[in-house]
Image (cartoon, grey):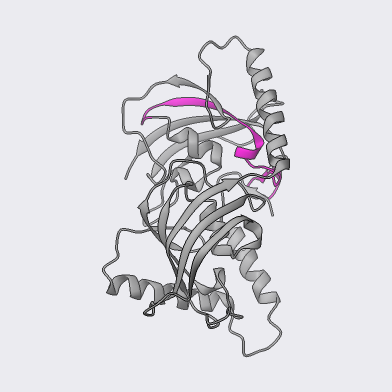
Amino acid sequence: MKRSVHRFFGIAFVAATLLGVTSCLDTPDIEDPSIQLQKDIQTIDNYMLSEGIFGYQEDEYAKIRFVIKKLGTKLPARSTATKITADYKVFSIPPGAAPYEQGQVTSTQLGTLIQAWQTMAMKLPVGTIADIYTPSVWAYGTQGKGDIAANTPLLFEDFELISAEISTAEQNQFKADTTAIRTYLEGKDYTDVIYDTTGIAYRITTQGAGLQPSWFSKVTFKVQYKLLTDDTRAVTDMLELKPVENSTDSRPVDYIQGLMVGLQKLREGSKATFYIPSGLGFGVQGATNNAGTTVIPANANIIVDVEVISVGQ
């Protein structure tokens, strides 16, 4: 499945995952996972309300709630090929007196772990410590695990993303991409290019004076994508992306990693152009538009024009 050009993960991802789970059900007494998801969300919300937990963040599509205790500073895991190291304690919801288990996963490929971990490791900055409340469909589902019963929503308490190491293939692609971007920029007459340590390059063409967003700030901005190999035309129309009422959309963490970094460098009112290597863009999946047409091929370096309109909390 390719990513939408406008979102890092989206409704299609959740729908496809739930469809995949449903297709595996071969007995009539196993409940539709979408129904179980709603039950789990209600269980989690009731528990958080009873405990007075209100200051939480949410993954808009998977409906995973999380409370950040310490915010990291490094980029999240890049893909399911990334190897992560993380500490955790896992409880049922509502929690029992002791965790089911606690420990550490060490240099483990993200794609081999439960979906909740995949989602959160690609959203939380490395170094973050958080309590994660996940519906069972993103954990151990209808099968359970050990003492964890089937259809049990879980609390991963003090989940700490210690490190995220990209694969050798991703490292090689990254080197090729950053070289291509530097070669492209050196062929221009720009005198204001900034090369960031993350691998993106950028030019701030208008310096705003307003608020500057952080990882989880709500941001309204305009964006236009071009391919580095064809900078004469946009692959999407200029669109204004802004939070919908009661939504957690349009936070830097909801977008490709190049924009996670880039948006945090701009104040309200700023305009900038970012040159983003494919691994910090749409990677090996590429991206489609709303009609499902491929507009950004796999492993394509991109140019992204951004105008920050407003920054909220």
Kindly tell me whether residue 260 is visible in this rendering. Answer: yes
Q: Residue at x 72, y 29 (%)?
A: 176
Q: Residue at x 71, y 35 (%)?
A: 173
215 displayed left or right of 196? left
Residue 171 x, y percent position in the rendering? 68, 37
Residue 248 x, y percent position in the rendering? 41, 53
The verdict on residue 287 being magenta is yes
Residue 189, relative to residue 70: is it above or below? Answer: above
The verdict on residue 102 being magenta is no
Residue 3 x, y percent position in the rendering? 63, 49
| Span colored in magenta | 267-294
31 displayed left or right of 96? right
- Please identify the quarter of the rendering in which residue 247 is found: bottom left
16 displayed left or right of 68? right
Residue 21, relative to residue 279: is it above or below? Answer: below
Q: Residue furthest bottom?
A: 29
